[in-house]
Image (tube, helix red, strand yellow):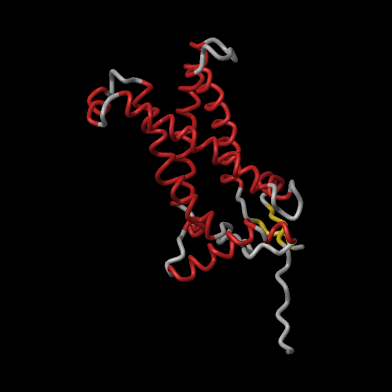
Amino acid sequence: MEKLYIHPLPVRLWHWTNALGFLLLIATGLQIRYLDLFQLMPFRTAVVVHNWIGFILIANFFVWLGYYLSSDKIKVYHPELSPKKYFEASFRQIQFYGYGIFRGEPNPHHPSAYKKFNALQSMLYQIIMMLLVPIMFFTGLLLWDVGRFSSIVEMLGGVRVVDTVHVLLFIVFCGFMIVHVYLASLGHTASAHFKAMITGYEEVEDEPAQDGTH
């Protein structure tokens, strides 16, 4: 087992801030929308906390974006430009997640400092970070002060449309977090990937030696 430094400190700080922030957004968002079902906190408190956490995560997003754009770590998000290689790698990863892992087969993806995502993760994280997260923040900002942004809200179809998009993305992110935690538990031990996001070091299994004899 080899230890590789894959998660720099700024990425780890961003990750855990994001994780805690999204959990708080989910809790306060549920309280705001379903006030009649349960009482985690007063409605007004839920609104204030939801708004402040939203602004903190918007700032956190730009810290993440600035770090990657100003460093060579942006390479981890570079897509595979060969469609053939991308689909072959994706298919291998789907096979692994679908049944290979249950048969004790090794993960076909071997992470490195500049290639920490497998083919499926690479595409998914690009969609999430560069499309879904900005839309989530944008709709949240519009709902924060509908009066101030009334012209934009009306141009997009009204409060109902903006709110529906925001809620749908809330559902998507809830699902993502559940799947994310599950997949994070699929390392060589259940806690390996979680420890890596604390220490920065991933424990990577040695690749099988190529036997040249037949």
Q: Position of residue 112 (x, y in %)?
A: 61, 62
Q: Is residue 59 left or right of residue 96?
A: left
| On-image quarter of the C terminus | bottom right
Q: Nearer the viewer, residue 18 or 210?
A: 210
Residue at 49% across, 65% down: 87
| On-image quarter of the N terminus | bottom right
Q: Position of residue 47 (x, y in %)?
A: 47, 17
Q: Nearer the viewer, residue 105 or 126?
A: 105
Residue at 26% across, 31% down: 156
Q: Position of residue 134 (x, y in %)?
A: 40, 39
Residue at 72% across, 73% down: 208
Quadrant for residue 39, please give it: top right
Name the residue at the bottom extreme.
214
Q: Nearer the viewer, residue 54 or 99?
A: 99
Question: How many numbered marks are there?
Answer: 0
Q: Is residue 59 above or below residue 73?
A: above
Q: Position of residue 90 (x, y in %)?
A: 53, 62
Residue at 40% across, 44% down: 131
